[in-house]
Amino acid sequence: MSQSRPVPGRRLDSDRAALLSRTCEDVAQVGDLLGPEPAQVLARLRERALPDEDVDAVLAEVTELMRARGLVGGDTTFRGPRYLPLPGIHGQRPEVVHVCPGDLCDRVEIPRPGSGASPVCAVWDCPLPQFRLDR
């Protein structure tokens, strides 16, 4: 894991944040199949002054790397109800969730029972920190 500490500040617009969230989760889940290249490309998003066009280019490059390895990228269009319950909460609001460490995207992960490990952020190369919802 990298020793880079996320620096909160810039937040992507909602469309880019949603796409980054899906891409980050995909890379974190199948990183062993992809090798280090997608995570290295995503690391460019750590630069807070990156223009939106460069963010788009990074996300497109990662999607293309995933496709080249036979994986569907995070830009897959989902058609269905606009609001769905988060998986794993069974109609109850969780007390704690894992969120983007740099507050760059809208990724939220529900802690998995029995799993001691936090999900990993592919941009910052670190575990997603916990966020208490009862604040």
Image (spheres, grey):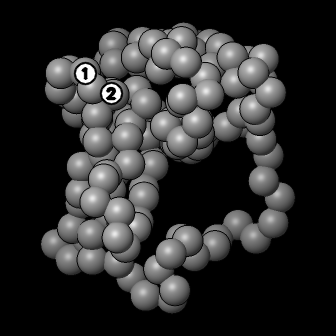
Amino acid type of the residue that numbered disc 1 sits on in the rendered structure: Ser
Q: Which residue is mark 1?
A: 2
**Image side of residue 96 versus residue 20, left or right:** left
Helix, strand or loop for disc 2: loop
Residues tagged 1 and 2 counted as in contact (Cβ below 8 A): yes
Q: Which residue is mark 2?
A: 124
The residue that appears at 70% across and 24% down in the rendered structure is 66
User: In the rendered view, would you say 4 is above or below 82?
Assistant: above
Where is residue 7? Give x, y as percent: 20, 27
Foreground: disc 1 or disc 2: 1
Amino acid type of the residue that numbered disc 2 sits on in the rendered structure: Trp
- How many C-alpha atoms fall within 10 Å of the one at disc 1: few (<14), some, or many (≥20)? few
Which picture quadrant has residue 63? top right
**Image side of residue 11 versus residue 14, left or right:** left
Helix, strand or loop for disc 1: loop
**Image side of residue 61 versus residue 41, left or right:** right
The residue that appears at 76% across and 71% down in the rendered structure is 81
Residue sitting nearer the eye, 41 or 16? 41
